[in-house]
Image (cartoon, rainbow, N blue to C red):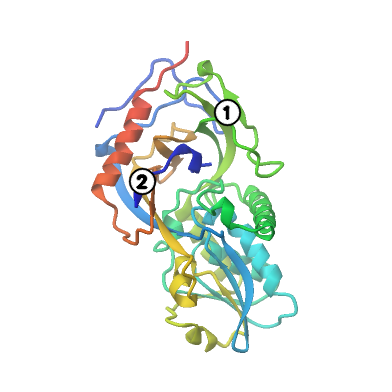
Amino acid sequence: MIQTLPRRHFVAASAALTLPGCAATTARTPASCLMPVMASPDRVIRTLAGLRPYRPGGFVVRADTLGAKRLVHNYGHGGSGITMSWGTAKLAVEMGAPGHSGPVAVIGAGIVGLSTARLLQEAGFPVTVYAKALPPDTTSNIAGGQFHPFGLFSADAVTPEWRRQFTAALDYSWRRFQIMVGDDYGVRWLTTYSEGSPEEPKLATFPPAARALRPDEHPFPVERLWQYDTIYVETGRYLRQMMRDIEGAGGRIVVRDFASPAEIASLSETLVFNCTGLGARELFGDMELIPIRGQLAILIPQPEVRYAFTGEAGYMFPRPDGIVIGGSYERNQWGTEPQPERIARIVAAHQRLFSGFRCPA
């Protein structure tokens, strides 16, 4: 089934549009008149399609055994891999590391695997990351990069214990990303405008600076809008730096595909972390895990656009490598090639949104 993602699930050909007297905003500074995104087909510089590893029951962080090995699973983050990465890595390391000595293996080099590897190194363990694909060829590279849990679970399918894991993981990730802000990792704060009414806080400190806006406080052609501040990650830069960190701390990164658990059992490491994302479906038989495909169009960068948006039109996240626009949520679709008709609809929806900008009097 293919559908356009409505606003409630997000929390993720014209010439240049100019509005007289509108000045660019600064990050984390609300303004009544923002610079519009120039969304048109001729400004698309690349298109992408990524598969979110979704489980109705939410991510899995669980200890298991594999022959004589201790195996810790850390996968199934849906559309929240970046958001939850440090937090579920912490849960997994705390579950698997106590009492262990010697080298550790991490399977998977997306953001969850790299975060798990770094926390293991910080705990003093020598680490080897084994992965079928490395950045820039991972699902994490395709992510928009907004810190906001999205597309992660079905409310009626998770347990109270899982919700406790979720809250603990979200809290740690939120604090960890705050100390990584800067050019090295491509992590920054942005004011985000979200269609609808303010959502219930997920933490005492998230989302911060949240408030509903009056029509005279914004230029968006929508009935209700609220704003908050959050963190955005330039995924390509971030993943490259994470790999440098791992190797700089003495870790190894090895390209290797595992066809079965028996092949993992043949590794010399006696502690293994499974961070294979969607790959855990076939590798470990988790049939609850399915792909949710998201398609993106990347527009020519506009440095003057210093805010993000989510709503009925989709979502827009500005990054130095291009303006990311998306808005598809395609359940159980396995193809990774962008579909021109879907991309065209995403671009057209954002073109309508930003052509409707009005500077309040």
* Label drawn at residue 71: none
Looking at the rendered structure, the kind of residue marked 2 is Gln
Measure how far apart labels 1 and 2 are at the Cα level: 33 Å
In the rendered image of this protein, does residue 335 appear above or below residue 285? Answer: above
Residue 326: image location, x then y, percent: 39, 43
In the rendered image of this protein, does residue 93 appear above or below residue 21? Answer: below
Q: Helix, strand, or loop for circle 1?
A: loop
Residue 209: image location, x then y, percent: 64, 32
Residue 91 visible at all? yes
In the rendered image of this protein, does residue 57 appear above or below residue 16? Answer: below
Residue on which the image places disc 1:
29
Count the numbered circles shown: 2
Residue 197: image location, x then y, percent: 56, 30
Tell which residue pokes out farthest to the front in this image. Answer: 156
Tell which residue pokes out farthest to the right in this image. Answer: 99
Q: Residue at x 69, y 60 (%)?
A: 161
Closer to us: 281 or 219: 281
Looking at the rendered structure, the kind of residue marked 1 is Thr
Residue on which the image places disc 2:
3
| Residue 330 as seen in the image, left or right of residue 157 | left
Q: Residue at x 42, y 81 (%)?
A: 259
| Residue 148 as seen in the image, left or right of residue 14 | right
Q: Quadrant of residue 117?
A: bottom right
Q: Helix, strand, or loop for circle 2?
A: strand
